[in-house]
Image (cartoon, rainbow, N blue to C red):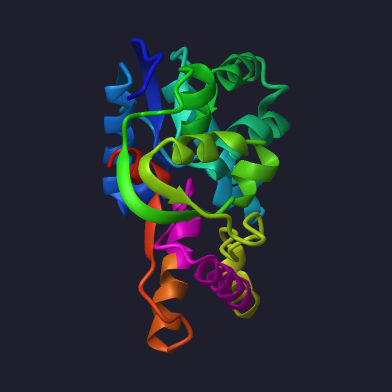
Amino acid sequence: MFKGAYYMRIAFFPGCMVDMMYPEVGIAAVEVLERLGCEVELPKDQICCGQMFLNSGYEKETIPMMKQVIDAYSGYETIVSLSGSCLHAIVNEYPEYLDDDPDYGPRLARMRKNCWEFTDFIVNKLGVTDVGAHLNAKVTYHKSCHLTRLLGVKEPPLQLLQAVDGLEYVVMEQADRCCGFGGTFSLKEPEISTEIVREKVRTIDASGADVVCGADIACLMNIKGALTRMRREGKVSRDIRVMHIAEILNS
């Protein structure tokens, strides 16, 4: 059973894809956080972080979105993001455009210190590695690019998975290789993106896992689509379930 939980009021940043397409993942994350003693709030004025617009070159058009995110979240002492890519945009990309703003610059600086990624928050803020979950499955983990490389969150997801009762963790070869989604990259370079995700699926299949999980829903959506197509083509010999780590921790 989990140890070290205590009461804390937090603001939740689910990310657009969870909010609009995978609400069950957001629900699972909130239930885990509440079980650990957190009071979870979703600010009414929260919107998209604007990352995909920044990546597409619309910097000036994105600034009002950045400011609204700051308006919605800067009053909280703790902010927990379910998306590594969104969190990277807020803590590492926003300063480039707002540091010199006399109002939003200081508010962003304070807000950035209060931001946590979901698994990092549980392990390194709450001090919990065992959340009391149970799953009888052989599980491998995809190390998403933004979370692993740009935010440096490497060990917390693995610590949480390895503490799940009944779960057998298996290492995927080249687990930190990109899945090919890359936000707008998959739209701009679909042929390259397809080959990258097919390589990812082959490494998942080779791991022998029953379940592939990750901490970024965009990666998992891309992987699940490729798994389905390759299974239909006969290039994956078995059904492999795709789960967000929040769903595993809520099992």
The residue segment tinted magenta is 194-223
Tell which of 240 and 112 is nearer to you: 240
**Residue 209 is inside the magenta segment:** yes
Residue 17: give x, y in percent of width and height: 39, 51
Residue 160 in the image: above or below residue 184: above
Q: Main secondary structure of the magenta part?
A: helix
The percent coordinates of residue 181 (x first, y second) are 56, 63
Q: Residue at x 60, y 66 (%)?
A: 180
Q: Position of residue 204 (x, y in %)?
A: 52, 66
Q: For the image shown, how many numbered marks are present on the structure?
A: 0
Q: Quadrant of residue 203?
A: bottom right
Image position of 32 (left or right of 152): left
Q: Quadrant of the C terminus?
A: top left
Does the magenta portion include 114? no
Using the image as rendered, state which of residue 8 and residue 67 is in the foreground: 8
Question: From what the image shows, is residue 181 above or below residue 191?
Answer: above
Please state which of residues 199 and 132 is positioned toward the viewer in this rendering.
132
Residue 168 in sight in this render: yes
Q: Residue at x 27, y 39 (%)?
A: 27
Left or right of residue 223: residue 55: right
Residue at 34% x, 36% y: name it: 29
In which quadrant is the N terminus drawn?
top left
